């Protein structure tokens, strides 16, 4: 079979297998496009007004974002606009007075009422709202219908705190939106535009519609469940409402967005974003500590105290030799000790052997011949009495030298 024919058969076999599999795959599978909204990253994760700022920059407007109101770093000028998402009740009185003075010179301020925190007897408006004659209404918030052409059931301000307005001298109620009482007084409002000097202040029940897509909705919103995400500026009606509220000074000055939150701390980022690094390191540390730690088992007996008495060791060794029939070794050790001293004290007697040595030792010690002969004669291995007697005699003879 030629090489060309072999490759032709291989290609035909691949086509015979691949074409049916391709047709089967295309008939049994359908392409579906699914859009998933990823959680915000960077500044968008902690700045709810980030999307608003980007939209205003795209429209050619200068925008500055701040976490808190800081008049020392914010150079507010007439015809500027300040969106205050921060809780206005937390502003000190000097800051509130400075903001109202700036509004009187031509500024535009957007502020919200204090958020609902669950305290039934909450009576705090803050010096800013008190100076404007705004009084927050305690109790559950109600949704305000907002008629949109393509969404007739659209509502807004469901999670905000409604308010009433009694403007002080120098402040005029220009527009309002909400409910009125029997005397047509502004009561239960969700929006009010107050004229103050050459500028204006817009008071809102909430500013959830200005937030970017992906931020959680308030838990007290009747139409939202815990963990739901607000549409924010993703909704067309919210964009129209935001544009209407920013209209008085739109394009005339700088937009200041105070979002009322701080970037996550370093420890927050390390804990939630750096866990792929610190979790393995922590496990490695725990494993090393477990390896190096002392094992906790059953109690061990106390180690025996060292016994330093030489006499006890000698006695124990002798008893051991006697127990196993090694009595001649004890006698031989004592006899060698006697002969060693004899060689030092009487070398002539030590050099002799047999009866001559016995006679020389008896003469030297002035002992009877038979007694010395008995001491130098090896006893039977089982005769302990004779062993003790001979050892006693050898020790006495050694001491007399």
Image (tube, rainbow, N blue to C red):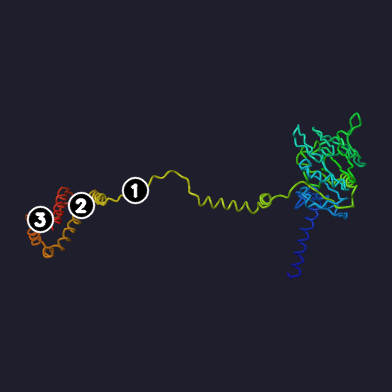
Specify the label residue 327 is tagged with. Answer: 2
Is disc 1 surrounded by few (<14), some (14 to 19) or many (20+) residues within 10 Å? few
Residue 21 found in image quarter: bottom right
| Residue 207 or residue 90, whichever sits in front | 90
The residue at which mark 3 appears reads as 372
Q: Residue at x 77, y 58 (%)?
A: 18
SS assignment at label 3: helix
Residue 234 in percent (x, y) is at: 84, 47
How far separated are the C-alphas under marks 2 and 1?
29 Å
Task: Please report whichever mark, 3 or 2, sits nearer to the chain's N-terminal start.
Answer: 2
| Residue 350 or residue 66, whichever sits in front | 66
Task: Please report whichever mark, 1 or 3, sits nearer to the chain's N-terminal start.
Answer: 1
Q: Residue at x 75, y 47 (%)?
A: 261
Specify the label residue 129 is tagged with. Answer: none
How far separated are the C-alphas under marks 1 and 3?
43 Å
The residue at which mark 1 appears reads as 305
Residue 170 found in image quarter: top right
Question: Where 256 sits versus 194, above or below?
Answer: below
Mark 2 touches mark 1? (CB < 8 Å) = no
Is disc 2 surrounded by few (<14), some (14 to 19) or many (20+) residues within 10 Å? many
Give the left or right position of residue 87, taking residue 202 as reference: left
SS assignment at label 1: loop
Residue 229 in percent (x, y) is at: 79, 43
Question: Where 301 sits versus 401, above or below?
Answer: above
């Amino acid at each position: 079979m030629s090489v060309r024919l072999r490759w032709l058969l291989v290609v035909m076999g691949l086509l015979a297998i691949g074409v049916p599999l391709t047709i089967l795959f295309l008939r049994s599978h359908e392409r579906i496009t699914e859009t998933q909204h990823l959680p915000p990253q960077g500044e968008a994760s902690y700045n709810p007004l980030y999307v608003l700022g980007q939209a205003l920059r795209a429209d050619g407007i200068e925008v500055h974002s701040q976490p808190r109101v800081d008049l020392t770093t914010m150079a507010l000028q007439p015809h500027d606009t300040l969106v205050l998402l921060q809780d206005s009740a937390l502003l000190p009185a000097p800051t509130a007075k400075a903001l109202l003075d700036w509004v009187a010179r031509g500024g535009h301020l957007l502020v919200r009422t204090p958020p609902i925190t669950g305290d039934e007897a909450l009576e705090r408006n803050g010096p800013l709202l008190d100076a404007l004659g705004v009084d927050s209404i305690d109790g559950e918030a109600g949704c305000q219908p907002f008629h949109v052409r393509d969404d007739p059931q659209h509502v807004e301000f469901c999670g905000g705190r409604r308010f009433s307005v009694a403007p002080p001298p120098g402040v005029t109620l220009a527009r309002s939106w909400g409910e009125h009482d029997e005397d047509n007084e502004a009561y239960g409002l969700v929006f009010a535009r107050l004229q103050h000097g050459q500028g204006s202040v817009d008071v809102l029940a909430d500013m959830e519609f200005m937030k970017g897509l992906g931020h959680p909705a308030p838990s007290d919103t009747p139409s939202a469940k815990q963990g739901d995400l607000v549409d924010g500026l993703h909704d067309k009606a919210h964009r129209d409402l935001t544009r209407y509220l920013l209209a008085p000074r739109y394009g005339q000055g700088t937009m200041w967005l105070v979002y009322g939150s701080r970037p996550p701390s370093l420890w927050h980022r390390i804990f939630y974003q750096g866990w792929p690094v610190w979790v393995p390191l922590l496990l490695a540390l725990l494993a090393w500590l477990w390896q190096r730690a002392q094992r906790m088992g059953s109690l061990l007996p106390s180690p025996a105290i060292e016994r330093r008495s030489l006499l006890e060791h000698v006695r124990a060794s002798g008893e051991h030799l006697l127990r196993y029939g090694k009595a001649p070794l004890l006698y031989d050790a004592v006899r060698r000790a006697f002969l060693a001293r004899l060689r030092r004290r009487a070398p002539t007697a030590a050099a002799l052997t047999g009866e001559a040595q016995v006679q020389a030792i008896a003469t030297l010690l002035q002992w009877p011949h038979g007694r010395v002969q008995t001491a130098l004669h090896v006893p039977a291995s089982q005769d302990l009495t004779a062993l003790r007697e001979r050892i006693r005699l050898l020790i006495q003879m050694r001491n007399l030298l």
